[in-house]
Image (tube, grey):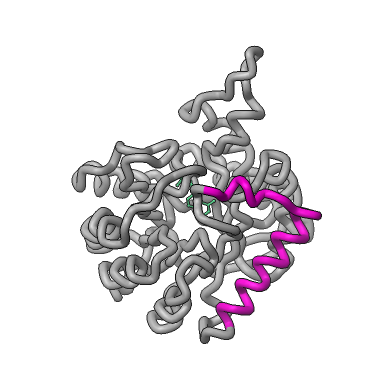
Amino acid sequence: MRGVRAPGAGNVDAVTTPHASAPGPARPQIIGILNITPDSFSDGGRYLDFGDAVAHGEQMAADGADFIDVGGESTRPGAERVDAATETARVVDVIAALAERGLAVSIDTTRAAVAAAAIEAGATVVNDVSGGLADPDMARVVADTGVRWVLMHWRGHSADMQRLAHYENVVADVKAELEDRVEAALDSGVDRERLILDPGIGFAKSAEHNWRLSAHLDEFVALGFPVLFASSRKSYLGRLLEDESGKPRPVGQREAATLATSMLAFASGAWGVRVHDVAGTADARAVWLATRSAL
Ligand code: PMM
């Protein structure tokens, strides 16, 4: 594994409290989304070409991304799965090219074999939307390589996940299920310091669940792990902004709403946000940092 590091990633682990009312990392991380898939809901089909994918990753880094999150399988609700060989082939060369340029890369996958190939190519974070549930070998790959591991809250694969969106108390239930994933990771020998938690906005969640999780993100931060928040262009924002006829706001016109949710996540102490629009989010982060330093 190469020791790559994104520009500005030096304080990636810093969790300071500059002011009692503004908890969170010294500088929240921006994770730029690079989906090399034909069918992701927002950028599907745009980066299937190697050159286009690498150029977009470089652009996001120049715009302020601390990590580039490369994915080779769509996780949008209802998506069909691809096989591991196809998923690996989509991502490895792009990861290697980005890592060679000195960029920090995370691999968005639920499969241990894909994660291992991506780490070999230079990825230093595994972004696992299943929180280790989809593949029993994932914990071993993470433990053996010592990479960071995003454990996202998840209840099932995309094809049927909306059927699983039932909670007694969504905040308490998601927290408890994430804590179970942390226990399982630690039992497998993964270092506690390597873990990042994510409530999984849109995964087995209704719009109301997403708003509750967003409003109570500070409770996830209080668990003592870095928290990643990922709302970018998701359908609950489209629903919020629907027109008079009830038509959701199109995916490409949800950027201001995404930024608002990211800013609220920063204020709740989130470690980072995963977004499509890195340049806009970097501006919002600058506003957040200036505001916090003036408290
Ligand atoms: N959402 C998507 C994909 N990967 N990873 C994490 N950690 N959290 C998320 O909420 C998440 C994710 C789906 O969005 P996309 O199709 O825009 O990538």
Q: Is residue 94 left or right of residue 173?
A: left
Counting from the top left corner in percent of width and height, residue 123 is at 34, 66
Is 179 inside the magenta-drawn segment?
A: yes
SS assignment for the magenta stretch, majority: helix
Give the image location of residue 229, x and y in percent.
Answer: 59, 52
Relative to 5, is 262 on the left or the right?
right
Residue 125: horizontal and vertical position, in percent? 42, 67
| Residue in front for this viewpoint, 276 or 247 | 247
Front in this rendered view, residue 19 or 234: 234
14 versus 255 height, above or below: below
State the residue at coordinates (57%, 31%): 256
Answer with the quarter of the image where residue 25 lies. bottom right
Residue 226 seen anywhere in this rendered image of the structure: yes
Q: Residue 113 at what x, y percent from top left?
A: 33, 70
Residue at figure coordinates x 45%, y 67% from the top left: 10
User: With 216 as the anchor, is 243 left or right in this view?
Assistant: left
At a point 44% along the width and 41% down the height, the residue shown is 276
Location of residue 108 (image quadrant): bottom left
Instruction: Name the foreground residue: 159 vs 188.
Output: 159
Q: Is residue 112 above or below residue 199?
A: below
Q: Which residue lies at the image location 31% right of the left edge and 38% below the top edge? A: 45
Residue that lies at the very extreme toward the top in this rendered image: 244
Q: Quadrant of the N terminus?
A: bottom left
**Viewer-nearest residue: 133 or 124:** 133
The stretch of residues the image draws in magenta is 160-186
In the rendered image, which quarter is residue 218 located in? Answer: bottom right
Judge whether residue 95 can be spotted in this image.
Answer: no
Number of numbered discs on residues: 0
